[in-house]
Image: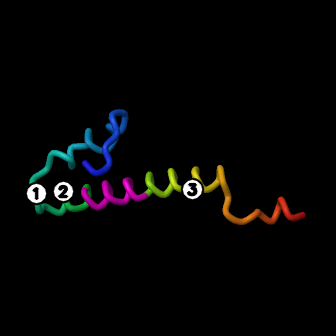
Amino acid sequence: MLNCKPNDLGLILLPEARGEPDTLLRTAFEARERAYAMWCQASEASAVNDACPVAPSRASRA
């Protein structure tokens, strides 16, 4: 699994994860897995950026 964390069992427990390679169900699972990994990376990056914003927010300028 991409970027698998020990507590990240939600997707790998689905029946699609154990499906045959190159089937539509398995392909859909892999696409969802990639999207979830990208979402996790983006949310981690935004959490870091929120802690140290590069530019001041509009609220802080008011």
Crowding at dot 2, Cα within 10 Å, few <14 / some 14-19 / many 20+, comes out as some
Asked if the residue at tag 3 contacts the one at tag 2, i.e. Cβ–Cβ closer than 8 Å, the answer is no
**SS at mark 2 in the image:** helix
Give coordinates of residue 13: x percent, y percent. 26, 38
Q: Which mark is residue 46?
A: 3
Task: Kindly identify which residue carries mark 1.
Answer: 21
Residue at (48, 58) in percent of width and height: 42
Give amino acid for label 2. Arg
Give coordinates of residue 37: x percent, y percent. 37, 54
Give coordinates of residue 54: x percent, y percent. 67, 63
Q: In the visual, does 56 lie left or right of 8?
A: right
Give amino acid for label 3. Ser
Residue at (15, 45) in percent of width and height: 18
Crowding at dot 3, Cα within 10 Å, few <14 / some 14-19 / many 20+, comes out as few
Q: Quadrant of the C terminus?
A: bottom right
Towards the viewer: 28 or 9: 9
**SS at mark 3 in the image:** helix
Task: Kindly identify which residue carries mark 2.
Answer: 26
* Magenta span: 30-38
